[in-house]
Image: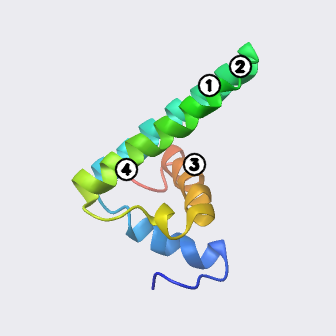
Amino acid sequence: MSEGFTSFRAFYPYYLGEHRDRTCRRLHFVGTSFALGFIVLAIVRAEPRWLLAALASGYAFAWVGHFFFEKNRPATFKHPFYSFAGDWVMYRDMLLGRIPF
């Protein structure tokens, strides 16, 4: 099941299946944490260029996780919006202990 998702609820289990490797999940977590820091920096300093750093760090860490540890293609290539949302939901679930870190 990788095509034709009609809702994020239907997509999220697929997304989690693409993140079985613990190192991949950890890299996602690190990249998203850096992204949050860069977003805060962009707001505090009123410098939008930090938003590019947020985007770059989020994707760079995630893609390293996928290509070198998970050994799959990031879901963002086929499902960019659901994948973006999935990363934030997975981040929250890791923070809450719902998904092993």
- Residue receiving disc 2: 47
Residue at the image point whose x is 57% and y is 48% from the top: 92
Question: Alpha carbon of mark 4 to alpha carbon of mark 3: how far?
Answer: 19 Å
Q: Distance between the residues labelled 3 and 1?
A: 22 Å
User: What residue do we see at 36% from left, 44% from top?
Assistant: 26
Q: Using a 10 Å C-alpha cutoff, classify the residue at mark 4 as few (fewer than 14 neighbours), some (14 to 19) or many (20 or more).
A: many
Q: In this view, does 19 lie above or below 25?
A: below
* Amino acid tagged 3: Arg
Mark 2 touching mark 1, by CB under 8 A?
A: yes
Residue under label 1: 50
Amino acid type for the residue under numbered disc 1: Trp
Dot 2 or dot 3: first in sequence order is: 2
Measuring from the top left, give residue 6's x and y in whole percent: 66, 83
SS at badge 2: loop
- Report x, y in % for residue 75: 46, 65
Q: Is residue 71 toward the left or the right of residue 31 in the image?
A: left
Residue shown at 72%/14% (left/top)?
A: 45
Of circles 2 and 3, the one toward us is 2
Q: Is residue 12 visible?
A: yes
Q: Residue 63 carries which label?
A: 4
Q: On residue 92, which mark appears?
A: 3
Q: Which of marks 4 and 3 is nearer the N terminus?
A: 4
Q: Pick whichever of labels 3 and 1 is earlier in the sequence.
A: 1
